[in-house]
Amino acid sequence: MSLLGPLAVATALLGAAAALSLSVLRPPRIVLDALATSCAAVVLGLTTSLLVASGRGPVISWFGGWLPRRGIALGVDFAVDPLGAGMAALAAALTLAALVFIWRALDHAHGLLHALLLVFLAAMVGLALTGDLFDLFVFFELMSVCAYALTAFRIEDQGPLQGALVFAVTNTVGAFLVLTGIALLYGRTGTLNLVQLGMTLHRHPHPEGLVVVAFASIAAGLLVKAGVAPFHFWVADAETVAPTPVCALFSGVLAPLGLYALARITWTVFLPALGPRASIITWPLLAMGTASVVIGSLMCWWQRNLKRQLAFSTVAHSGLILLGVALLRPVGLAGAAVYLLGYGLIKGSLFLSVGALMHRFGGRVDEDALCGQGRGLRGLGVLTALGGLGLAGLPPFAAFVGKSMIDRGANGPALVLVAAAAVLGSVVTGATVLRVAARVYLGLGRQPTGAVHRHGSRRPGEAEPEGRSGPVPLTMLVPVGGLLLAAAVAGVAAPVRSGAARAAAAVAQPVAMAQLVLDGRPMTAPAITVAAPDAADWVLGLGSAAAAVALAGAGLAAAAPTRARGSRRLRNGLRSLHSGHPGDYVTWIVVGTAALGGVLGLGLR
Amino acid sequence: MAALLGWALAGLPAFGSPRASLGILIDHLGPSVRHATDMVAVVNFDARGIDTLAEEFILLAAATGVAELLRRARGEESGPAVDQRSEFGPDPGSEALRRVGPALVGFTVLLGLYIVAHGHLSPGGGFQGGVVLASAVILVYLVARYADLRRAAPLPAFELAEAAGAAGFVVVGLAALAGGSAFLANVLPLGTAGQLPSAGTIPVLNLAVGVEVAGGITVVVAEFLEQTIVLRQRVRGRR
Amino acid sequence: MTVLPYAVAVWLLLVGLYGVVTSRHLVHLVVCLAVVQSSTYVLLLAVGYRSGALPPVFAGEPAHIRAVDPVVQALTLTDVVVEAAVTALLLAIVVQIHKRFGTLDPDRLQRLRR
Amino acid sequence: MTGTTLFQAVVLVLVALGGTLVVLARDPLRQVVMVSAFGLLLAVLFAALQAPDVSLSQVAVGAIALPIMILLALARIRRAPR
């Protein structure tokens, strides 16, 4: 019986309640900052020790002491393996960085923002640790509600409201889809515990329509959160307008958590349920992942708004991680986990560096408006460039290690697809960051025309008066650098790689896992080793980093956006799809869910 | 989509005859293990207490979001809230309302408290009772002079109640943890089934939820109310 | 009767989604979302219903009477609270949108943004 | 078909109809009335499905709190100068 998991959630929730009560008294800002930051630090400590503890075997704790009776789960449990604990620790680390970052930003932030951020943290930790399907849904909703409120935080502009509306409507529809799937599964099995669901469905060897449709609706709901095409439309609208430190959380943990939950449910419930037919879910997921990589990369490259670029790169990288999950092999899953860790840290750092830029230049986020403005900010420039290279897959950042592991999980045509998509996604999104870094910090490339340069291009709803044109304080640089450093350390440290591999191998043994959770029978973790990246991986990693530099150079060299008519038509077409109309987006969700279910159903025949 | 769902539903057991499930087990276990008579309360506040904890914080987060959204907007467009009643709601001077109002409010408060207190015994509980309590407060807002009321029972007080209720739930859970049991374990004496103090922590948690929900719903509705009132001021100022 | 409750749940889901997709007024859209959500209530409760059973509240009676599934009811209860919370937040956003954009028609909103 | 089942069937059909009317009511004010009625119908259905706890919360949320919030939001919107 471990206290760590419940304690982590309880700490964050209590901190939130305290921040909310304090805000009534209007205390000096520093009190709230200190309270929230120390809370997040404690949660980071708790989740990290949980990560260490779970390395010795899954950590189970049953709430209220409702232990299973005769192998039947009665209550709700936290079943923590290194994957879940790692996600929780990532969430805590990014929240801590964001909280430190806002010490000197968001002047009008009072206790409400701190309270919302801490509840958000609690929800993410709970979602990562839980072993119960409905509990997962509740934490999922908790996380979403905080996210909607945080998106609309700056109501002075039109953009945040529009973004929050689209975000809330699409994700609420997604949540209903998840809940419908849960109701179907409960009606079929009479249980909500993940491992027990898997075992109960496993005993009926002929998977039926219900299982497939439940999978389709749960997967669709989670993929909405993950921002995978064709469910990704809200991402750009929300991540362009939310306060930048919050965007770091959305991009670095919220979207990955959707994929984490999908992976967890797929491996624990649906792979045992589908048995030998499980391979039917591989190709639909691979297709969606590839589509996300392509759409996300292209849209990212074409944007001029710094935050919108990073938002579309979220879409691309979510697709990439989904590819690792979709292979349905332990090595792929372990690779996806390592990639996710590295990506989340780098992405958080990049969003925070954009936030620092906006702080320095009175909220300007347009690439053209900022051209050459950052010449004095060497430190920030170097960190941004390093982040871009890390995104492109430069060793030794963890994203590089994860990508090489994902490739090892594939073979045949899937390998070609996965490897190509991984290169495309990381090179293009990395190159975009490098292009921006060269223009903003070095003043290279096309010079903007007068008016834009003077006043910045504040298209309504796009720019944000977040900053106050001061120098970049140390409290902003430290989180940016710290997250990058963590991403590099995670890439070098061998325990990360081997731990992820062991955890993935354990997840791949649902029967042993179920016996551990329900009967308390100890499970022997199977030995699985993943070789360190070899020479070929290094060549590929260095190659894609070089390709990103070259592409960024090409982007700078192009004097004006002269493109072939075909590409322009493609660009306009893609842009018009991202209409900002909630009705359109919901249509895509419905069509996507139906298509996913239909393809799976045909596969089952 | 319809066809798919239809196909899925064919896999469900026929309506009215579910297979053996967790719920049936709880029906059998609940009375003996927890000395409560309302099994839904046993599930909500004991076996799946963590769900309810998260659910309370969903409400808290939403109320915080609503307050954030509507309050800042208010701050930027008007001065202090003055009484402005004639266009909306009953006239505060209305004799009939003055007489009936307090009785009505008193009755609603009693009803709310009753529902909260009997959550583990009969249908109802912290959430339902909390909504009733909040509606009592709203009733006061409607009946009494708004400005007087803001002075007597300011909105921050309800925000505090909301936070305190939510924190109370966590503290009860942590207390069990400190006592060496699991988080949210039912550590209080169970008492006799059917009596008001029975079922251990379930009524305590119900109370915490009642306070939280009453505070939260009051904050939300009052924020919406203030929106209409502030606006009226502006319209009038322009005439 | 064996499928009617499920059919009603599916109908509510589809008709609500239709409303969301075709809505010309954001308040209407939010209300349609509530209809979609009510489909999950019906589905959950239908899944746990046992014919001829009593509510899972044992007021003084011996505990071995046939009762319906309390777990789905607890889940639905949670769901109802979630709906209240999400709807309140959405309505607050909608009110603000009206203040900033001066319209609540998603089509005109979209044009204004460009 | 017993009396209970018949009652449940009737309420179910009414709920389906009510949901449709809510969606089809394009005038927000009329919709508020519909929502309130739909909320009550759902509460009746839940009671018929032996779920008194859920029925009570549905009355509180669906038939009272939700319509009040919508009404207040609409009042705000209607009075706002364009």
Image (tube, coloured by chain):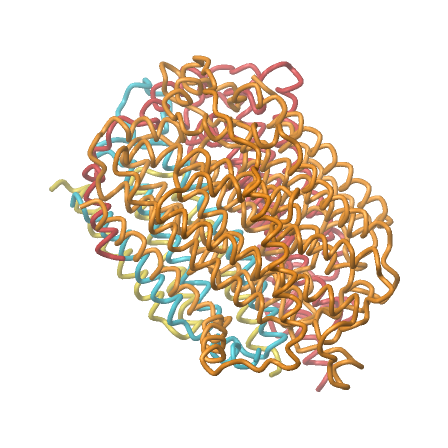
Position above or below: A553 against A592? below
Q: How many labels does the image show?
A: 0
Position above or below: A121 against A355? above
The spot of residue D63 in percent (x, y) is 43, 55
Q: Which residue is drawn at 36% across and 71% down?
A: D25
Q: Which residue is drawn at 57% across and 82% down?
A: A562
The spot of residue A382 in percent (x, y) is 78, 56
Position above or below: A169 against A223? below
Tell me if I can see residue A61 in this picture: no
Q: What letter labels the chain drawn in red?
A: B
Tell me if I can see residue C21 in this picture: yes
The spot of residue B228 in percent (x, y) is 62, 69
Q: What letter labels the chain drawn in yellow?
A: D
Asked whether, in this view, residue A586 is left or right of residue B71, the answer is left
Q: What letter labels the chain drawn in orange?
A: A
Q: Dividing the image into 4 quarters, which one contains the N terminus of chain A?
A: top right
Q: Quadrant of residue D14?
A: bottom left
Q: What letter labels the chain drawn in cyan?
A: C
Q: Residue at x 46, y 63 (%)?
A: C30
- Residues B47 and A453: in front is A453
Asked whether, in this view, residue B97 is left or right of residue B37, the answer is right
Position above or below: B203 against B8? above
Asked whether, in this view, residue D22 is left or right of residue A209, the answer is right
Q: Residue at x 63, y 20 (%)?
A: B177
- Residues B97 and A330: in front is A330
- Residues A78 and A24: in front is A78
The spot of residue A41 in percent (x, y) is 74, 36
